[in-house]
Image (cartoon, rainbow, N blue to C red):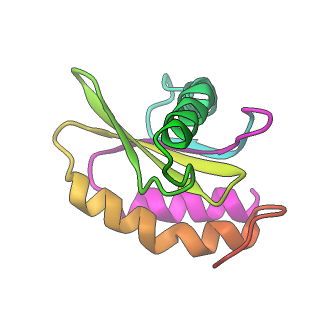
Amino acid sequence: MSKIDDLIQDFADNVPNYISTAIVDMDSGMGVGSYSADPEFDASAANAAYTDFVQANRDALEILDADPLDTTDILITTNGMYLLIRELGEDYYMGTAISQDGNLALVRKKMEQYEDQFLRELPGASVE
């Protein structure tokens, strides 16, 4: 297991109603680490598919003359889960899925608490 995978596992252990997490490289769309509590849920594939969505959000912010990296998080809701995406610097993002019984405020706080730890382990990422 990599240090990133260890951090994801620790994060998962601290998030009630956890389903999955992946850290994704924006350039390639490839997951650099992931964990899913549900063996049927492919966290890397699901989050890689959202790379275009994160880039579209950046493009929309540029059109609005806003900083494209100023997004705190992106929330996607489905009938069965919440997917919360948090950008990790310019080159990566973290996607976490929880059940709809989960506490979004808690997940946001946990993602924020782990952000610097992930950034320290990601190639080329910087902790501000």
User: Would residue 10 be counted in the magenta stretch?
Assistant: yes
| 64 left or right, relative to 68 | left
User: Would residue 119 be counted in the magenta stretch?
Assistant: no
Residue at image coords 32%, 57%: 107
- Is residue 75 shown above or below 5? above
- Is residue 51 shown above or below 61? above
Query: Which image quarter: residue 46?
Result: top right
Furthest-right residue in view?
Answer: 124
| 96 left or right, relative to 92 | left
Query: Where does residue 98 sit, x and y in percent of width and height?
Result: 32, 41
Query: Which image quarter: residue 27?
Result: top right
Query: Which image quarter: residue 7?
Result: bottom right
What span is in magenta? Answer: 1-29
Query: Where does residue 117 sit, x and y in percent of width and height?
Result: 61, 74
Residue at image coords 27%, 55%: 16
| 81 left or right, relative to 118 | left
Residue at image coords 28%, 31%: 81
In the rendered image, which quarter contains the N terminus? bottom right
Query: Where does residue 82 sit, x and y in percent of width and height?
Result: 30, 36
In the rendered image, which quarter contains the C terminus? bottom right
Residue at image coords 44%, 56%: 12
Query: Where does residue 26 sit, x and y in percent of width and height?
Result: 71, 40
